[in-house]
Image (cartoon, rainbow, N blue to C red):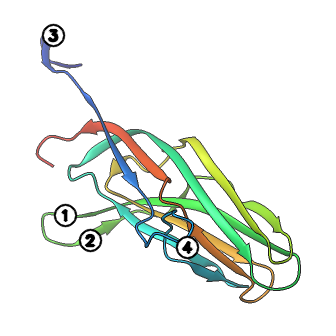
Amino acid sequence: MRIKPGEVRAGVDIFQTHTFHLADGLVATDGIQHSAIATVGTTAVEILNKLIDPGVSMNLKEIQSHFIYKFTELKDAVGSLIFHLKAREEYVNSEGTIVTSNYCALSATYALGVGSLATVEGTLGGYLNVGSIGHAPVRIVFTAQAKVADSMACSVKNASYLKLVGIVVPGA
């Protein structure tokens, strides 16, 4: 609740939640929907780059995540890679200009080993640090880098989601 000068109630802040599924690709032969598949090599590759726009401007209080990734080793050798999740504020101002902030890490940088021609799936889940990302809309990026050129196929499952929790900014 906000208080105006003179101890008068200005209104009650009501928390809003917006949930966004992150993968929007085709349904695979196993019946599971994945994002587009990215081939990862020795340079960092964006597996997912998506603008999360709740349709209103929000002061973010927390970000909840359930992020399911899938890595498949493509070569006949054991592979390893590093990956992380990052985000930034991104919106269009009243003049029509895109305004962005710097990217902030939403997760640690993880290292993973994948056996020869094997597939590994995992989950990054929980409450993510809002940190410097004070407002929504938010652009989220999932990046990976392998130790060997073109050695991994990576995707994100449709069961992955991001939930933004915050207070709507009136008139924004």
Q: Nearer the viewer, mark 4 or mark 2?
A: 4
The CA distance from mark 3 to mark 4 is 51 Å
Kindly identify the amino acid type of the residue bearing the numbered disc 4: Ile
The CA distance from mark 1 to mark 2 is 6 Å
Which residue corresponds to the image point at 23% horizontal and 49% vertical from the top-left?
57
| Residue 145 horizontal side relative to residue 163, left or right | right
Q: Residues within 10 Å of mark 2 (few under 14, many from 20)?
A: few
The residue lying toward the viewer, choosing from 126 and 100, is 126
Which residue corresponds to the image point at 54% horizontal and 43% vertical from the top-left?
129
Q: Residues within 10 Å of mark 4 (few under 14, many from 20)?
A: many
Q: Residues within 10 Å of mark 1 (few under 14, many from 20)?
A: few
User: With respect to residue 149, does 87 lie above or below?
Assistant: above
Identify the disc placed on residue 98.
Answer: 2
Which residue corresponds to the image point at 54% horizontal and 72% vertical from the top-left?
29
User: Of helix, strand and loop, which one carries label 2?
Assistant: strand
Kindly identify the amino acid type of the residue bearing the numbered disc 3: Glu
4 and 2 marks in contact (CB < 8 Å): no
The CA distance from mark 1 to mark 3 is 33 Å
Q: Nearer the viewer, mark 1 or mark 3?
A: 1
x and y, in percent, of residue 84 in the image:
64, 62
Q: Which residue is mark 4?
A: 47
Q: Earlier in the sequence, mark 1 or mark 4?
A: 4
User: Of helix, strand and loop, which one carries label 4?
Assistant: strand
The CA distance from mark 4 to mark 2 is 23 Å
The residue lying toward the viewer, choosing from 56 and 19, is 19
Q: Which residue is mark 1?
A: 93
x and y, in percent, of residue 24 in the image:
40, 67
